[in-house]
Image (cartoon, rainbow, N blue to C red):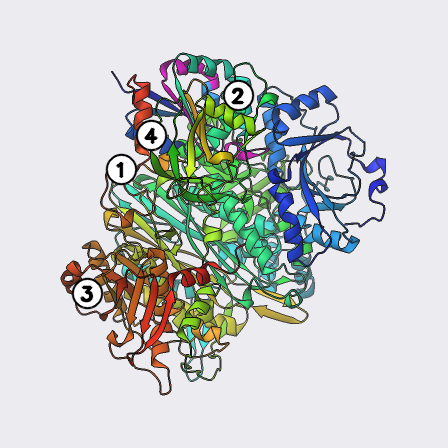
Amino acid sequence: MQASTEPESATAAATLPDAWRVECFRRSVADDPDGAGLPAAAAELGIEGLDDARLGRGVLLPASLGREHIERIIAELLADPLLDEVRLTAPGQLPAIPAGVRRVLVARKPGVMDPVAQTIRETLARVGLARLDPAECVSTFRAWELSGPLSDESAATLARRVLGNETIEDVLLDDEGLHHGPPAAGAPHGRVEVALCEAEDARLARISDEGGLSLNLEEMTVIRDHFRAAGREPTACELETLAQTWSEHCKHKTFAGTVLYSSPGQPVRRFENLLEETIKRATEELDRPWCVSVFHDNAGIIAFDGDWDVSFKVETHNHPSAIDPYGGAGTGIGGVIRDILGVGLGARPIANTDAFFVGPSDLPAEELPRGCMHPRRILRGVVRGVRDYGNRMGIPTVNGGVWTHPGYVANPLVFAGTIGLIPRSCATKSVAAGDWIVVAGGRTGRDGIHGATFSSVELHEESETVSSAAVQIGDPITEKRVLDALLTARDRGLYRAITDCGAGGLSSAVGEMGEELGATVDLETVPLKYPGLTPEEIWISEAQERMVMAVGPERLEALVEVFSAEGVETSVIGRFEDTGRLLLRHGGEVTGELSMAFLHGGTPRPVREAVWTPPEHPDPSVPACADHGRTLLELLAMPDVASKEWIVRQYDHEVQGFSVLKPLVGVRGDGPGDGAVLKPLVDSPKALAVGCGANPRYGLLHPGRMAAAVIDEALRNVVCVGGDPEHTAILDNFAWGNCDKPDRLGSLVLAAEACRDAALAYGTPFISGKDSLNNEYRVGGRAIPIPPTLLISALAVVPDVARVVSMDLKRAGNGVWLVGATHAELGGSHYLAARGLEGGVVPAPDLATAPGVLRALHGALAAGCVRACHDLSEGGLAVAAAEMAFAGELGLTLELSAVEALEAPPGADLDATLLYSESTTRFLVEVEPAAEERWLAAMAGVPCARVGRVLAEPQLEIEGLGGGRLACIALADLRAAHGGGFQG
Amino acid sequence: MSAPRALVLRAAGTNCDGETARALELGGATAAVWHLERLVAEPDRLEQTEILVLAGGFSHGDDVGAGRVWGLDLRRRLQAELWAFVERGGLVLGICNGFQALLESGLFAPRGSAAAERDVALTANTSNHYECRWVSLESLDCVCPWIVAGERWPVPVAHAEGRFAVADGGVVERLRAAGQVALSYVAPGGGPAEYPANPNGSVADIAGICDASGRVLGLMPHPERNVSPWHHPRWTRMEAREEGEGLIFFRRMVAVAAGVSV
């Protein structure tokens, strides 16, 4: 990035691209919202002096084409005749830049995916406008023209912070020297050996570090000894394969490892395999007949209706999203969609979910740690990433959440989930000896090298610059083509097994598929984006939008035809063989040979220590509330409670036509729904409810109670809308600090045990999960972990779509009932957070009674005696009541004295306890007077009290325990508080 | 007579073809979904087709411009066949991205006009981002034979580039006079729509137009997403119902294709 003082003459002609340069600018400001919006975005960063901005969409086309030819391409393809004016610059020339403007050019770095350029090249050929030689390049860029008294420094800041991301893009200020051509060739080589056998500890550690292998000393030692015994040095390919396969990301060494756990006053306990003994144990013991496939495949599968099953997977994509929020989140959703395409023989994705954990949007710039992006930029970026990928795939994004906490400033969390519909007969797969290994989809490039190992280490100040190769750029249309082709091929039985190419690239995909047999791969047959890749790069590249299949020789021709009809490239890269070995060749030369047994079973099983010491906070009890009206408005505006409409509306939540309960409900569509409901089978009344739960504030105080509470929350969200708690599966996504450290691991043990206990109590098995256990940020000498974060996603079968209930109040005169017991549980609550207080009792369900409450409520919903139902979560009863009221455009009067006896510590404000406690397993339910008898019968034995009535007057009235009025707030004020705040 | 035959056309990145075919079948047609490349290879299929629908989605990623590449494909590789189809009475519908592509294809313009002469466009929403929300549509007095003037109906929109724009004020007047303005966004109580009732800033609240013959219709909203009783965003507030308000749109189109006037 160079700031020049002589903008118009700065670029030497020699550096100007030898290509036609087409820049399409909108004629009128009104048609250029990107440009029109830039001055405000600049002002937000404190950048002064930008009066106007215009965005030009730029394309570089080969110099070999004549001017008339270029003009025809512009007229037919590149420019809109009505809206655009075009600046055409001949090869090697400077563009005619208007006087007084400063230019910022933003172009993908050489070798980074440029899907638009790819589309242009293919289209020119297809419609007969130009057939380009493979060596002739097309590339795109953005040309910003800025006017106003902008200082050099301001222009540079604007360019870097707003207009481009130097991780993946070249950002040129007043410099027209765009790169044009393929990326500089690497140093291609054949077989390379690494001198390991004689290496001592220090050298082993250095080889791992310098190679970005993320293998620890113990693992390096095991590898060295393995090759010593074999009497030869390992090749680079072999070392990389082991690093990918043994990475924390792929192997979950910590969670599946041996743990020695101690807590004050307790004897040390030993877990041989933490995951097996907690999460998976619950699923095994429950042994639900409707669990079709759990844990071992790319996603879990449960029975749905008739011959149809559903699969669900939620993934994390945290580290890439920290350095490139847009690309990281987009490829995150792209990756989890491929998990669903690769589960069993492939499922059709029918819904996406997303959950973000970010720093506060109002974080002062001076508090931003070095090397970090502002939380606002991160949140906007990840929302755009999910939007652009999910919407283009034609998969509705129906459920999710955003949680805000300062602990995520340097290490945001991005979770993306996909639900798929799959015929029962397609739930399993197996590879046969003699099957071709076929790769389909995008080409392989040098992108995403070391993603799996990168995600397994801490982020640090330099992550942004050193890890750029780990970031990938998504191309959703390629993935959509793969989806269309793949489901056709599946239905015609053209492949025997399939998996996605995710972390670790081909090395993981082929390594996993061939685990039981063996495989030979000829790396030079993998289609490349550009020449010059080394065998290792081909093997571990995480280039996106690729699937790997095992194809019987007799089906190969038909399979290639199906993919080709959708414009998807396929290539046979090797064969599965019954050798027990993985053989890698490049141009006939052996570049690696490993036994599958060592590759998959050779990982040393470390023993880690775990310690749990509860944090020490004085118990703040429940401080008195002087003004309940103001408090409620304050709670509604807190970021975890406030409206997410600005996000939800950018996602297509209707595509495919299955969404029957939308994420936003109510008269004006501003009510935050609890769960979304999909009805994917046209001829069946059955539907699916999807919901989630998480709470980092609870996690910081007590990870065990947090885990039980968020499982309860996810279940509340699906039961609320009509899901059957007896036919509900859950997913776990753990994101923790560095679990090599005993205190981090101790809190993980607590959470995992609570997961097991809660799953057993509710009868809801875990069917899939993922952990990300290295979420720390190192700045200076200090490592800062994120709050212990557990995202629980729930998928429930709804027996009858006609009984689905939304959370908005329906009719004046109806009774409103509080279901569930309230305790003085305000630890981690929004009420205390708003007062800056920590400590207190974290809410947790009573596992003896909570499952009965969910079953009874489901019975009442299924019997049709509920008009509206909303769960009580952040902000407690007061927030739930307010949301139901403004969503239904109806008033509500609450009488706290109707609540059954409440136990609270001495000195607690009892009104505040009732209104703001976040005790779990509670709901607010609207019931017609005529249905009250049936309602009470359904709820027999469950704490349940009529605490209010729906009003025609547009206000929320709250009567305190003493009978006096605590608050009376207009719906308009509630709605304004909820809908204010950061809106993207 | 037998049910009219509908062909739902898709391209790489089209993603509403499934629900569009379902809506056509609910409306009384038989429906098949074809990739554009197949139709280019077998254009005679149009002779056994009464209804051609370009489904919504992100054809070719909307790279370069929304619907631009798909429209160019149609213009350069199928235009003569499409003109012939419309001239012999075939009905063409473009929904959302299908509308954007139809506009690029030249099928709304007088026959023989060049791409550069197009005087209407669908461009970036005023909000400058994708939006998914329900709106009210009003059916207008127009030459499209399956649009019944005066009706108001709810339907979702989901797009980033749906703002109907014109070269100059005269274009809207000309379209109106020719009966080509078919559908407009209306305020909840009727009358001119402000954002978000007009979700994208379209000139004169225009949501859909037809060609001079009335047989080619394009609209940004998605009627195929409001055909079941459970599609409406507020169905939990309503009495039990048989179908969504968008189904009649397809039923009438199919009836017209069968030679029945509505």
Residue drawn at (43%, 55%), measured in percent from left and top? Answer: A400
Q: Identity of the amino acid at label 1?
A: Glu
Q: Identity of the amino acid at label 3?
A: Met
Real-space Cα distance between discs 4 and 3? 44 Å
Real-space Cα distance between discs 1 and 3? 33 Å
The relative height of residue A16 versus residue B39 in the rendered view (above or below) is: below
The relative height of residue A382 versus residue A405 in the rendered view (above or below) is: above
- Label 3, secondary structure: give it: loop
Give the residues in magenta.
B40-65
Q: Which residue lies under the disc numbered 1?
A: B243
Q: Horizontal and vertical percent for residue A263?
A: 44, 79
Lateral position of residue B251 relative to residue A459, left or right = left
Mark 1–mark 2 contact, CB under 8 Å?
A: no
The disc placed on residue A939 is: 3
- Label 4, secondary structure: give it: helix
Q: Identity of the amino acid at label 2?
A: Gly
Q: Which residue lies under the disc numbered 4?
A: B249
Circle nearer the N terminus (4, 2): 2
Chain letter, disc 1 residue? B
Q: Which residue lies under the disc numbered 2?
A: B106
Chain letter, disc 3 residue? A
Looking at the rendered structure, whether the residues under marks 2 and 3 are on a common chain is answered as: no
Chain letter, disc 2 residue? B
User: Which part of the image, by quadrant, shows the C terminus of chain A?
Assistant: bottom right
